[in-house]
Amino acid sequence: MADLATRTLPLSGFHGGSASASVSPAAPASRLSLRAKPDAVASLSAALGIELPTRPKASASSGGRHALWLGPDEWLIIDETEADLLSSAASSGVMHSATDVSHRNTALLVKGPGAEATLNSGCPQDLSLAIFPVGGCSRTVFGKAEIVLLRTAEDAFRVECWRSFAPYVSGLLAEGAEDSGH
Amino acid sequence: MLLIYCPYCEEERSELEFRGAGDAHIVRPSNIADITDEEFEEFFFLRDNPKGLIFERWRHINGCGRFFNAARDTVSDKFKLTYKAGEPKPDLDAAAPAAALVETYEATESNAK
Ligand SMILES: [Zn+2]
């Protein structure tokens, strides 16, 4: 009988949160780190089936797929159905750089009335709705770790972090969630 | 918390997202193999370290990732303005006369952002 490797998710078994904010690991997703010049944006948008945003902190979401503006020529594409993003980008036929980072990143979902306070326990950005609306996204810091933040609802955030930082980020989020009710 | 305006993100962000990257507007010689050791030293190592206005490169490393330039006061630590990489060095004297430097805590820190 062949030995089969069992994939262990980076946050397998993690649970945390409080009455005011829940913190849970997101389901596995496929992810693309995408770089392209402005003249390639339209073709890449068509190939990926989602409009690449060109404004700071803007994102686009459709059918479990998200395109997050990270910089003037850089996006993070997330697909919650684990679709083959690399092939879609390649079919655009225009010059771009795409790297599969599905397993470099993992994500945590923070939800509840204390979600904003939980994130602000380690993130210096103004997360009030006027400045960071639903659909707003940004690469930023959480404590000592780099994260990518996406606001999915008024009281919910998706926190993308690198796999090796997941124990640190999840632990600090759990602490923040405990404090967010006070 | 010191806030720095990123010209690419078009908003002020915490200094925690940024990293300094040395003096701005240092032109790399086009004939670098031909210059003397003294000329290389001048280009590569020697900086003015002014007291007051300095032009520096900064990187929004934990944000949009872009390098940009900033005019900063080394006494008060205040950022006078920031601008995109590749844009010419601004003439700050023409824009607004600099206030006299007074090195008291109140003058340099009390209304720091
Ligand atoms: Zn920026």
Image (spheres, coloured by chain):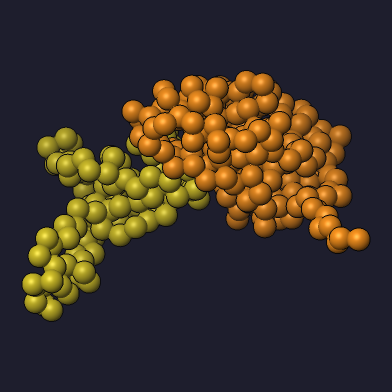
Q: Is residue A50 above or below residue A9?
A: above
Q: Is residue A36 above or below residue B112?
A: above
Q: Nearer the viewer, residue A21 or A104?
A: A104
Q: Is residue A138 above or below residue A42?
A: below
Q: Residue at x 28, y 39 (%)?
A: B83
Give the position of the C terminus of chain B as an image quadrant: top left
Q: Percent x, y for residue B21?
A: 34, 57
Q: Residue at x 17, y 44 (%)?
A: B89
Identify the colour of chain A in the image: orange
Q: Residue at x 30, y 56 (%)?
A: B74
Which chain is drawn using yellow?
B
What residue occupies the far front of the structure in this picture? A1
Give the left or right position of residue A73, taking residue A136 as reference.
Answer: left
Give the left or right position of residue B45, taking residue A126 as reference.
Answer: left
Give the left or right position of residue A126, taking residue B6 as reference.
Answer: right
Q: Residue at x 61, y 40 (%)?
A: A31
Q: Quadrant of residue A150?
A: top right
Q: Nearer the viewer, residue A162 or B6?
A: A162
